[in-house]
């Protein structure tokens, strides 16, 4: 099984997984959800070092670890020396001596990479400004539940070319999903990630970056959006509103997608901005299943990196 290869590994980017590893991780997440497999990680301790707010990631990681029989330590920056500026290179080497696995939510991808370099234990990206791979594991699990497959589907992301757009580009490319991102000019996804997604997709699937949300939404099986101003961009929230208004996921845009299309949003959502209340609460929305799947997908990930599978 390819997932055995994940033991001891970091997940800093979606591109850290091979296509086979992703497929098997998602299969394991689905089996964990049914309760038919119950891996155990007794005496293992997960640290959560979060420098930004979190509901889903914090709680789903914690519950997943508890259900595996392990323990969780909340290492919020404000209650550790991290908040007082202890160097990352020192914190990483110290935490490495106590913990078995560490999930980090921070701003710079570089800080996460420094942690991973200095800590030998598995380090998991629980969101940076560049990527949010744990969310994409749950997103792909949700798509697979709905359609029974991933390869050949089309996922359209409409909105800010942020961490979600970046990780979706990579995750879809790995899964053989055609991926389209529609963003306003100047708010496109990271160009290096777009290039990497194209390389991963190869001849198997298409990667389209456009400024046209209607073109992108046409006949898609999955319509995805996220906030227009991410954590750390609060001061830009007002000035971004008129720029992003044409990129709202509403009933008109959804009508252009495949009639069987589902709508995903990583949450938290700003109703009336990137998504309307009618769409978020409507029959095509799968956001609550998507949020639940964070727990199953991350349980699969934890079991794999801790060698419990
Ligand atoms: N989707 C997500 O990561 O949510 P939180 O910020 O609440 O963890
Ligand atoms: N792009 C959002 C995702 C939140 C889960 C942010 O970074 O704030």
Image: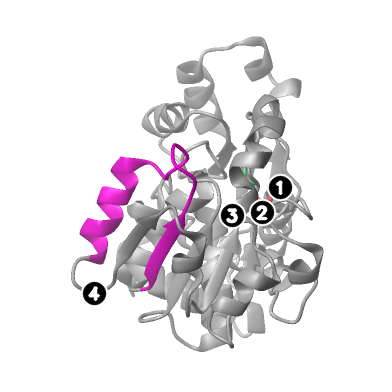
The answer to whether one can see residue 119 in this image is yes
- In this view, the mark in front (3 or 2): 3
Residue numbers of the magenta segment:
177-201
The quadrant holding residue 80 is top right
Q: Which residue is mark 2?
A: 61
Q: Secondary structure at mark 3?
A: helix
- At horizontal 36% and vertical 81% (from top left) the residue drawn is 152
Label 2 and label 4: CA atoms lie apart by 33 Å
State yes or no: residue 187 in magenta: yes
Task: List the single residue furthest toward the left.
Answer: 203
SS at badge 2: helix
User: For the image shown, how many numbered marks are present on the structure?
Assistant: 4
Q: What crowding class fits label 4: few (fewer than 14 Cα within 10 Å), some (14-19), or many (20 or more)?
A: some
Residue that label 1 marks: 58
Disc 1 crowd, CA 10 A, few/some/many (<14, 14-19, 20+)? some
Where is mark 4, residue-wise? 204
Residues at marks 1 and 3 touching, judged by CB atoms closer than 8 Å: no
Split into quadrants, the picture shows ligand 2 in the one at top right
Label 1 with label 2: CB-CB less than 8 Å: yes
For mark 4, give the secondary structure.
Answer: loop
Image side of residue 61 versus residue 109, left or right: right
**Of discs 4 and 1, which sits in the foreground?**
4
Report the mark closest to the observer, 3 or 4: 3
Alpha carbon of mark 3 to alpha carbon of mark 4: how far? 28 Å
Q: Earlier in the sequence, mark 3 or mark 4?
A: 4
Is the CB of the residue bearing disc 3 within 8 angstroms of ligand 2?
Answer: no
Query: x, y (%) of residue 213?
Result: 51, 61
Q: Position of residue 232 (x, y in %)?
A: 63, 29
């Amino acid at each position: 099984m390819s997932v055995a290869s994940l033991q001891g590994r970091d997940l800093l980017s979606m591109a850290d997984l091979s296509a086979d590893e992703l497929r098997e991780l998602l299969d394991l997440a689905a089996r964990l959800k049914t309760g038919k497999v119950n891996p155990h990680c007794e005496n293992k301790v997960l640290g959560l070092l979060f420098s930004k707010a979190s509901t889903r990631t914090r709680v789903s990681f914690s519950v997943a670890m508890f259900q595996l029989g392990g323990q969780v330590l909340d290492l919020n920056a404000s209650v550790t020396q991290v908040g007082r500026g202890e160097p990352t290179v020192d914190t990483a080497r110290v935490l490495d001596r106590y913990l078995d696995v560490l999930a980090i939510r921070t701003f710079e991808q570089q800080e996460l990479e420094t942690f991973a370099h200095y800590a030998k234990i598995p380090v998991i990206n629980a969101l940076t400004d560049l990527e949010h791979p744990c969310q994409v594991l749950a997103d792909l699990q949700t798509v697979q539940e709905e359609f029974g497959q991933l390869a050949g589907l089309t996922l359209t992301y409409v909105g800010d070319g942020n961490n979600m757009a970046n990780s979706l580009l990579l995750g879809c490319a790995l899964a053989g999903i055609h991926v389209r991102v529609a963003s306003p000019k100047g708010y496109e996804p990271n160009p290096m990630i777009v290039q990497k997604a194209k390389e991963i997709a190869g001849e198997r699937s298409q990667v389209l970056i456009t400024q046209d949300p209607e073109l992108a939404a046409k006949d898609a099986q999955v319509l995805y959006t996220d906030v227009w101003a991410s954590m750390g961009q609060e001061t830009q929230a007002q000035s971004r509103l008129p720029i992003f208004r044409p990129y709202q996921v509403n009933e008109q845009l959804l009508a252009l997608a495949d009639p069987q299309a589902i709508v995903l949003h990583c949450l938290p959502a700003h109703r009336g901005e990137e998504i309307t209340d009618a769409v978020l609460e409507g029959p095509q929305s799968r956001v609550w299943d998507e949020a639940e799947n964070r727990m199953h997908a991350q349980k699969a990930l934890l079991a794999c990196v801790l060698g419990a599978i």
